[in-house]
Amino acid sequence: MAKYNVEVLAPAGSMEALQAAVRSGADAVYLGAREMNARRNAENFDEQQLKEAVSYCHIRGVAVYLTLNILISNNELSRALEIVRSAYRAGIDAVIVQDLGLARLIHSAFPEMPLHASTQMTVMSPAALPALKELGFCRVVAAREMSEKALRELCDAARKLDMTVEVFVHGALCMSVSGQCLMSAVLGGRSGNRGLCAGPCRLPFSAPSGTGFDLSLKDLSLLSEVERMAQMGVVSLKIEGRMKRPEYVAAATAAVRQALDSNEVSQNLLTSLNNVFSRSGFTNGYFTGKIGSDMFGTRTKEDVAAANMAFPFIHEYYRNERQSVPIAIRANINENGSSLTLCDGVNTVTVNGEIPQKAQMRELDNDTVVSYITKLGGTPYYSADVATRISSGLFLRGADLNAMRRDAVEALNKARSKSAKRQECEYKLSREFYYPSQKSALVVRLEDANQMCGDMTGVSAVIFPLEKQPPKEMPQNVRLIADIPRGMPDELVASRLRIFKNHGCKAALCGNLANIKTVKDMSLAPIAGLGLNAYNSESVSVMKSMGCRAVTMSPELYLSDICKMNTALPKGIFAYGRLPLMLTKNCPVANGMSCEECGRNQVLTDRLGTQFPVRCRAGFSEVLNSVPIYLADRLSEIKGIDFMLLYFTDEDKSMVERIINAYRFGAGVANGGYTRGLYYRKVD
């Protein structure tokens, strides 16, 4: 019996993995349809398989969550809702969602469907919760980079809003904060935000004095922290691994189950779990705050060999049915007939058996009947309460008692797997349109005041890093906008915004949901930044309802699609600069040197010799693209865009001035290396 009312949530990339999870102790599983989920390369489930999976799990008292946790384009929204409708009617227990616009549509069309905010929403702060509650979310999956203290604060805040918190406790760790990675899309044409991450971070990337694999972290394991998380109010302990083998799912699920039930895991199981999949061991660095080189690791030949040896042992964890559902059993046998009743506390079923014969030699007794009707091996049930009423002088064959028990179990299975009819409503796509300006304004983001040009003609606003001192003077008719680092704590954001506000700042670029609330509380205008992943018109409409005044569209969209998209807010594009490819809590440079040694001006070098600058911002790091996006020679193709963001990082003042003039006048091809980003490339 578990000490805490906490859920063990396991991954199911296939039916075999689902069965392994359930038989190893999962209280819930999460799975994807054949399309539109963050693990599109897993086997996943078609419509019929999804129905079978829900039925299988519900019979065993296990909840099923559908992952629809990718960014959805405008022309995919209707299909996404069809998937939800099918899952809803099949009895799915919740949907895990990343896209804000899709979330609002689901809540509108299926108001009884619980919504879980995916970890790709980058929820790291209590300030993000009220807006999610308003959208209909009842649970948030916390960002994996949160410390124990931050996680405790999130649980406390969620409890006050009648929301719950789910936490990853075992499995692979992305180097980037989930939902904040563009590396796979930019370097490989396969988007992590769209469910097809190619995992480029596992390839060789070298930081100075590093190991050569300086974007590859060890797998996460918080087995030793399970009781502490349960005590702070975490309601679901999640295991990563929809791309993993059933043996891994079984071992990880059994380990979390043991840790939760008894606060310790057997050594044999720990050894097997370590062998079946690890990257030179495990880490708990984010939870404990002990980040640095100890968190890095790779998959070695020895790790692979150990996995092959572990598989046969792990099979035992899910070879047999797990009897986890208690039932009450009542048998009634008299001269008029026989019946058997099973009750799970909610569902009650009764089946009739054969009419007993008069006993010729040996009459039925209680012990004999009980021995037959409690043979529940191979089923998910066990007898918690048994009672019989048996008239004297009667006889039934053992085969008749077995048949009656099997029929009763089948009837109870059917009752438990039946989905209750739930409310469905009509939904309407947003018809709230903003009519764009005829000419795109220039908005310039500077790294420091030394980049400020003397001539800023044509620039409507300057965005400046919030962690730095605001410029002492601003050019005439140029607005100051604060750029909030995506990982900066709320209280620090508020204190820095006060300083910027005193310098005339009236707006702030927000890369996280939590920032929007903080900015509004300061009576400033929020502008949705890249970190909010605005991918469709519905999401922009949601951002407007949250208080945003303008939006920077996702750089994973085609330029032509952005230009044609009707939105509820003025929209802009990342038109120049080194695109931030990753947001990381553990700096990749920390795998080779300390912050004191770093000098805050380092690069990562890939196996081809390409260099990617690494920039520190408010306790997080950003890995920037090797070359800037450049579109100044394609301005005629930028129509219906309200502003172009020119994002300067390491450029000197003269370069800043040249680039601004190029975008003012539509100059030719840039000097040096550049990219068009993803604006003209198909991204899977």
Image (tube, rainbow, N blue to C red):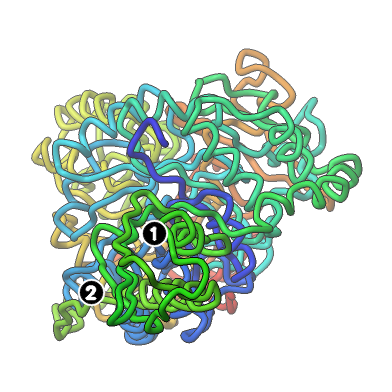
Quadrant of the rendering where the N terminus is positioned: top left
Q: Which residue is mark 2?
A: 105
| Quarter-of-image position of residue 500 | top left
Q: Is residue 51 left or right of residue 551?
A: right
Q: Which residue is mark 1?
A: 61
**Among the two numbered marks 2 and 1 on one chain, the one whose residue lies closer to the N terminus:** 1
- Residue projecting furthest to the front: 360
Residue 386: mark:
none
Residue 607: % across, % down:
84, 49
Q: Describe the element under mark 1 as helix, strand or loop.
A: loop
Residue drawn at 91 percent across, 44 percent down: 301
Residue 335: % across, % down:
30, 78
Residue 129: % across, % down:
22, 44
Q: Amino acid at mark 2?
A: Leu
Residue drawn at 32 percent across, 86 percent down: 78
Residue drawn at 49 percent across, 40 percent down: 653
Q: Describe the element under mark 2 as helix, strand or loop.
A: helix
Q: Nearer the viewer, residue 522 or 20?
A: 20
Q: Are marks 2 and 1 in contact (CB under 8 Å)?
A: no
Classify mark 2: residues with Cα within 10 Å, few (<14), some (14-19) or many (20+). many
Above/below status of 247 relative to 561 = above
Per the model, the C-alpha gap separating discs 2 and 1 is 29 Å
Q: Is residue 632 left or right of residue 106?
A: right
Q: Is residue 610 left or right of residue 377?
A: right
Mark 2 vs mark 1: give the one in front.
1
Q: Amino acid at mark 1?
A: Gly
Classify mark 1: residues with Cα within 10 Å, few (<14), some (14-19) or many (20+). some
Q: Is residue 639 something that shows in the picture?
A: no
Number of numbered discs overlaid on the protein picture: 2
Above/below status of 306 relative to 491 = below
